[in-house]
Amino acid sequence: MTALDDRPVAPLARTPRRALLLRLPEARRAGLALAAFAVGGLLVLLGAPVWAWAPVLAVCFAAGGRDPALEGLRALRGRRLDVDLLMVVAALGAAAIGQVVDGALLLVIFATSGALEAWATARTEESVGGLLDLAPARATRLADGAEEDVRAADLAVDDVVLVRPGDAVPADGVVLDGAAEVDQSSITGEPLPVPKIAGAEVYAGTVAAGGALTVRVARPAGESVVARIAELVREAARTKATTQLVVEKVEQRYSIGIVVATLAIFALPLVLGATLDDALLRAMTFMIVASPCALVLATMPPLLAAVAHAGRRGLLVRSARVMEGLGAVDAVVLDKTGTVTVGAPRVVGAPDDEVLALAAAVEAHSEHPLGRAVVAAARDRGLIVGEVADFVAEPGVGVRGTVAGRRIGVGRATSDRREGNPRATRALASSPHDHGATTIVDVTDLDTGRVFGTLAIADALRPDAAAAVAALTARTTVPPVLATGDRADAAQVMAGRLGVVDVRAGLLPADKLTVVEGLRADGRTVAVVGDGVNDAPALAGADVGVAMGGAELTMRAADVVVLGDDLRRLPWLLDVGRRARRTVVANLVVAGTIVVGLVTWDLVGHLPLALGVAGHEGSTILVALNGLRLLRGPRP
């Protein structure tokens, strides 16, 4: 089991959830019902007169029973009988025989669950809207040599648009003219900007830097890559919601059975000569002991306690359903960049000091992430970085300048003029393959045109990644899958360091979702771990989506958010989920056994109302306390 310390985790900036809850009428009514129940129940315990507590509990009945009553009536109009209406009837029946507090408690539980469901739905809708907000609302269209400001949604195929430095690309298209470095992290998840020149494809929502681009629109706004990502999230969310059909079928049969049994228990004694009061008392006793209050609490306390315990360890679990799903995970899909790596480039290998110092001198005036990585490597090695003159940055090509009288160029590897230079050929042969380099950079003497050094730049592996992957492997049936949009050779090197044997490289967002769907088709319960918006379809399509901090949009699409980006928490979280599932099963067995015993007693013999209420509420308290044990979590 993975050890986990109690060090505090820095809070994560995100959209305030309190404001969202206050906007939901279901949440406001649930809060009112809970407050009224607390005040009214306290007055009853203190022996206050009826006129003092009755109006307060009436407010609880009205606030907590409104939604389930309306839902139950709508179901009746559709010729269905569900547990919502059954709970209202049970609450009113309990009140009719003097058990007002018991009835109020049932309604409080149901109102709270309804508020949580409404909140989850609202958060899903917000996440989809946020995905679509990646693309800009306006665009600069070129027509007959003139510029015009138009809505991005009005762009048509073959329109030509101008993308200035710092602007977001308004639509998917092909570069006609210009050169720029484009940040595609919102689509591909990779941290390094990609050079774009004539003929290159660009995506809506990506950001240009260092130069302007003239782009021909290839797809309308509704068919862009980012729009397709949003639609994939919607479809995955709808698919996940269909699992609730099984629960609805159980509720339907249970509700019909309880109603039929209650009517029979009330009517048969009357036919056999019992008094109306006796028949009503027996029927209401049955309604109380057969109510699913204990069964509901058999599930929620352990799961919610596990959620709270995980939250104290820096893992935000969206719901009790997610915690239950974590306990069943037997396959894990890992994104690479920003998930098992730190998401920031660095120089790898052992380039010569002279090569590194010259490259750092030229790159010192560059704002490019690759340039910052080169300068940082030189400073870490303690090298003296000289002054550069005549500095020029060429988007998509590299930078050049004069250092100590030598004209030096630093740019992405495109030259084959390395023959006869052992430093360049040795660096090129070792660095990319030994260190999983994402980018190869040539350092060139511009006076002779000869490449005299090569730098390999790669994303650094997280220190805890290999241990976390080994722990996940021990806890799952299927070995973890590394799914990335990066090159296959770089992905294979990183997988070798991690101990991952199943590598899927060069994937777009839809391809990652296909990997998840393939595992689910094999009967696996899949958890996806990612950090970018490009991971959103896979996160939403998985049984459990885990976001490693990062983008707000990714966190909204995920079921679990890992604060502090500590991969060691993932195996531990699976242990918490499995313990919660075991506790739920034990609670259901206990609650079900007590309910069956009390119902049998009421049917076969004569169960006193007080004993029936005590047994029912006692079983509720028992399973609740058993569930709350998970606040301590599994032992290290």
Image: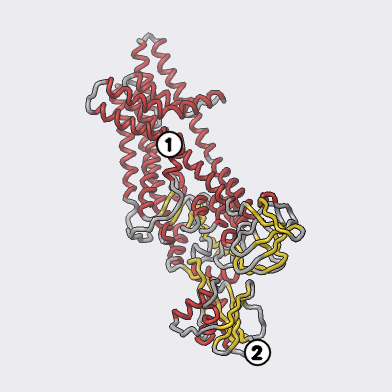
- In the image, residue 143 above or below residue 467: above
Q: Nearer the viewer, residue 105 or 187?
A: 187
Q: Amino acid at mark 1?
A: Ala
* Neighbours of disc 2 within 10 Å: few (<14), some (14-19), many (20+): few
Using the image, tell me which numbered label, if any, was put on residue 589: none
Q: Hey, which residue is sitting farthest front in the picture?
A: 146
Provide the residue designation for mark 1. 27
Residue 330 visible in the current orientation: no
For residue 52, side relative to residue 17 (left or right):
left
Provide the residue designation for mark 2. 448
For residue 511, side relative to residue 2 (left or right):
right
Residue 165: horizontal and vertical position, in percent? 61, 65
- In the image, residue 182 above or below residue 283: below
Q: Nearer the viewer, residue 129 or 109?
A: 129
What residue lies at 32% left-to-right and 42% top-to-bottom?
A: 626
In terms of sequence position, does the residue under pointer 1 or pointer 2 come before the other?
Answer: 1
Q: Amino acid at mark 2?
A: Thr
